[in-house]
Amino acid sequence: MLTSSSGAPIVTQPMLAFFAVLFTFPLWAEAAGLYHYLGVEIAIFIIYALGYNLLLGYAGLPSFGHGAFFGIGAYSYGLWQFGPLPGVFLGLAAAIAGAALAAGLVALFLSHRRGIYFALMTIAFGQIFWFLSIRLRGITGGEDGLLNILRPKLNVGWFSVNLSSNATVYYGVAILLTILIVLLWRLVHSPFGTALQAIRMNEMRARFAGYRVWLIKWTVFTLSGAIAGMAGALLALTQESAYPDVMSLHASGFVVMMTLIGGGFVSFWGPVVGALVFILARDVLGAATETWLLWYGLLFMVVMLVEPEGVVGVWLKLQARLKRLGPQPKPAEGKVSL
Amino acid sequence: MDFLQNLLPHLLNGLALGLLFALIALGFTLIVSVMEVINLAHGSLFALGAYLAMVIINPDLAGWGALDAFYMGLPLGARYVIALVFAPLLIAVLGFGLEILLRRTYGKKKEYGLLLTFGAALVLEETIRLVWGPGEKVMPTPQTLSGAFIAGDMIYSTYRVYATVFGAFAIGMVWLFLDKTPYGAIIKAGAHDSEMVRALGINLPRLQMLVFGFGAALAAIAGIILTPIWGLRPHVGVDATIPAFLIIVLGGIGSFWGTVMGGIAVGLAVGLTGAYASDWSLLSMYLLLVAVLTFRGRGLFGKKTALEA
């Protein structure tokens, strides 16, 4: 298999398995009782959670206002489509740029902070953007948000793809997710990724080792915000609207939940599993009862009490137990590469 | 002079808001300092406290006969005082329960505790919606506190004066408790170095439980006083905690006077801008925060503490 300079393979077996599931989903979705739109939503939230986990799982920086950048991406994309040059790629670029700009600005205040200071300040900044999104009615449409963002045609070279069906959108999002997974896998196994983990384990020691910690923190925050912006833009494209709900404190909390419930602290794949479980659980509970948020909250509490390392954490423990029957001890600290 | 006089009612509004925000923030800060947990359920405890007080003031006792006749025969003022005592106590008990659950997350990653309280916040908010419905409720207040009075040429709302005085009084009591009693000394020591406190033979788990309950009760008290001004709806907890978060960051985490000053500054900023552009009044507190953080990264009175590790 291809390997990168640091020795980690560029494409791994779990990756291939995931891509196989990802790209065949529209073929068996209806047979399994699912629908294309659900797949789009799950893929978008996987993008969001993967970007978020760069910050939480790898660098150990708990942002509780990440919904802001998701929302800014959605609004930037929507506003771009109302402008003179509508188009998918330009819209996505505008969303990524807008979210990165906002995240970069916020990160200037945050990159010297850690722990509870960091978390509280992300909440505060998240609220600023949420407030602006509601109050800047002339730009964002206030509480209603931006409506009727028409899906533009996707022009790739000479081809022109009509995005009116959710299946087409799904494949577009799946391609982006594939690229993102390969890039992020490469990134977390690069020296930069190692530095992120060094900061998570002991920030002071990382600084003494010569890393410019604040710059690394600034970069990862901005990058993570930009990815959230891309996810937001994709959701705006799919739903043909952008609204302030995604920027609220609750929505920001949900991405943290997604990341942790899957096992973001113990595996690269944690956020992928988490987003999947999160959206499916929402659909199942939402169909079964009006008060799904109540059960959702209880579910989270139970997960945090019983198995805070999430689904992948359980899986790894089972695997370790099986392995204990044979020789080979398990490394305790650090990322486990699946 | 005219100009200043026109501003006076707005200053009073701002001061009332600021002191009550500070009260919410103080409870939150105590919990952060002693347990290193960001209690995202704080707003829900605030709201639930107000709902419970509403029920205690006007309970549905039909079918209880004599008890109903006796209790509802009490003047509204008496029932209000009963609510002001018992609703926070009930919330404190709920806080004990939450803290006991939180114990499983101590010593692990801090995010786990934070997310446990986030789950609790969802549960509490949905429970409120389930029991009392999604609509707006009215928090009853005694007759003597409602209405308005005239001083000079301006009309003042009696309730806002009461809220201001009550807020200042409550903060003063918290300060006396923390600074002048041996229990306060133990709490402060616990915030500084909990291991050492345990080594000195103090029952740390019990201390943590009591502090969590105390912080929760402060939120409930603020909820009872603030909701007649703000209205009582399931979402009110989130609306109230957001300024509290800002105040804590603004004043410096773990600092008593920083929190109080931050609260007053935010309250005055919101009150004064409310006089000119009410839609944008909340923006002023965000701008205030950004301005302060630009020059003082840890807030007004913030020091480098163990909380940053």
Image: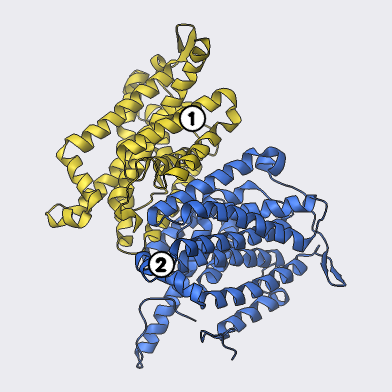
Secondary structure under tag 2 reads helix
Q: Which mark is residue A11?
A: none
- The letter of the yellow chain is B
- Foreground residue, B296 or B302? B296
A90 horizontally vs B178: left or right: right
Name the residue type under label 1: Ala
Q: Quadrant of the C terminus of chain B?
A: bottom left
Residue at 69% across / 45% down in the picture?
A145
Instruction: Name the residue beneath numbered marker 2.
Output: A200
- Foreground residue, B78 or B289? B289
Extreme-front residue of the structure:
A210
Residue at 64% across / 52% down in the picture?
A72
Residue B139 in the image: x percent, y percent?
45, 27
Instruction: Name the residue beneath numbered marker 1.
Output: B269
Tell me: residue B77, above or below residue A302: above
Name the residue type under label 2: Arg
B119 horizontally vs A179: left or right: left
Q: Is residue B91 among what the camera can see?
A: no
A138 horizontally vs B195: left or right: right
Extreme-right residue of the structure:
A158
- Tell me the colour chain A is drawn in: blue
Residue A234 in the image: x percent, y percent?
69, 61
A91 horizontally vs B78: left or right: right
Toward which corner of the image does residue A88 lie, by quadrant? bottom right
Residue at 47% across / 45% down in the picture?
B294
